[in-house]
Image: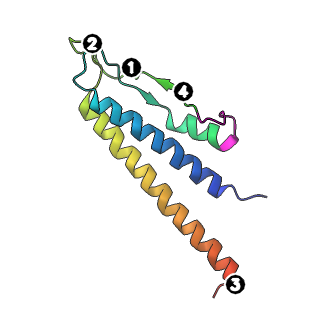
Amino acid sequence: MPDNTIKTLEGMLDVATFRQKLLASNIANADTPGYKAKDISFQKELLKAIEGTGSKEKSYEIYEPLSTMTNRDGNTVNLDIEMAKVAENTLTYTTAIQLMTMKVRMMKDVIKGGR
């Protein structure tokens, strides 16, 4: 049975990186009239990355979350929600990096013969 750990962690890093850019854009546009907050489903996009069902260009399905109310100017960015998403996404990214580091270290140990 093949070990897909590296591919899974790579997918996590790719999806988390894209999501971070999207969330940063939401925060940057918090005062832009008419701007609609955007997000992706991390789980759905990770599954596509792992299964290889995503396109080679790594396009993601972006949606407008319904969890925020529209401001008078038509903007749907809620800074508290966006900052919570950024914190969650940062934790996911950091965890993937730590797991990737551990996996590479284990592979190096196997190659060295456990020395």
Q: Which mark is on residue 97?
A: none
At label 4, the amino acid type is: Glu
Q: Is 14 inside the magenta-drawn segment?
A: no
- In which quadrant will I find the N terminus? bottom right
Where is mark 3, residue-wise? 113
Q: Earlier in the sequence, mark 1 or mark 3?
A: 1
Magenta region, mostly helix, strand or loop?
loop
Which span is picked out in magenta?
A: 50-58
Question: How far apart are the alpha carbons under marks 1 and 4?
Answer: 15 Å
Viewer-side residue, 83 vs 55: 55
Where is mark 2, residue-wise? 74
Relative to residue 102, is residue 36 depicted above or below? Answer: above
Residue farthest to the right, as pictured: 1
Binning the other alpha carbons within 10 Å of mark 1 as few (below 14), some (14 to 19) or many (20 upward) gives few
* Residue 52 x %, y %: 69, 40
Q: What element does badge 4 sit on? A: loop
- The answer to whether the residues at label 1 and label 4 have Cβ atoms under 8 Å apart is no
Q: What element does badge 1 sit on? A: loop
At label 3, the amino acid type is: Gly
Q: Which mark is on residue 66?
A: 1
Q: Nearer the viewer, mark 1 or mark 2?
A: 2
Q: What element does badge 2 sit on? A: loop
Left or right: where 74 falls relative to 48? left
Q: Which mark is on residue 61?
A: 4
